[in-house]
Amino acid sequence: MGLVNLGLIVAGVALVAVGWIRARGPWARYRALQEQDANIARYESWRGGVRDGGETGASVAMQVLRRQARNGAIVIVIGLILLIGGFGLPALP
């Protein structure tokens, strides 16, 4: 295994770790806000109130969190590509 291959593997592992750390927090908070929004919708339907379809602070926060989680997932995919390249390329000096 060449030095370039080893460098690609190390960089891939590092990017996967960084992407996981960056995506995990926002995704968990997004799921919590999603559950809370569904709970409010159930309560409003039970109460018989009409729910306004406008944009709320929670919906904006969910968009931001979803974007942050997506960016972390993109970093993970790039890291996986580097890992595959590090193992798949012939031994480079």
Image: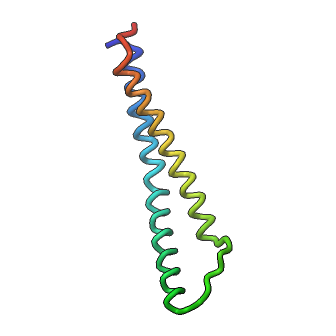
Q: Residue at x 45, y 64 (%)?
A: 31
> Which residue does the image show at 56% across and 63% down from the upper left?
62
Q: Position of residue 65 (x, y in %)?
A: 55, 58
Work out which residue is located at the far bottom of the displayed protein and give it: 47
Left or right for 54, reference 6: right
Total number of numbered discs in the rendering: 0
- The x, y position of residue 35, in whole percent, is 45, 71
Q: Is residue 84 above or below residue 75?
A: above
Is 68 left, or right, of 32 in this rendering? right
Rendered location of residue 38, percent (x, y): 48, 75
Q: Quadrant of residue 17?
A: top left
Q: Is residue 24 above or below residue 32?
A: above
Q: What sort of colour scheme is used for the picture?
A: rainbow
Residue drawn at x 46%, y 57% is 27
Q: Height in image: 52 above or below 6?
A: below
Q: Quadrant of residue 58?
A: bottom right
Residue 68's place in the image compared with 47, above or below, is above
Q: Residue furthest left?
A: 1
- The quarter in which the C terminus is drawn is top left
15 or 48: nearer the eye? 48
Image quadrant occupied by the N terminus: top left
Residue 18 appears in which quarter of the rendering? top left
Look at 65% across and 80% down and name the residue there.
52
- Toward the right, the furthest residue is 54
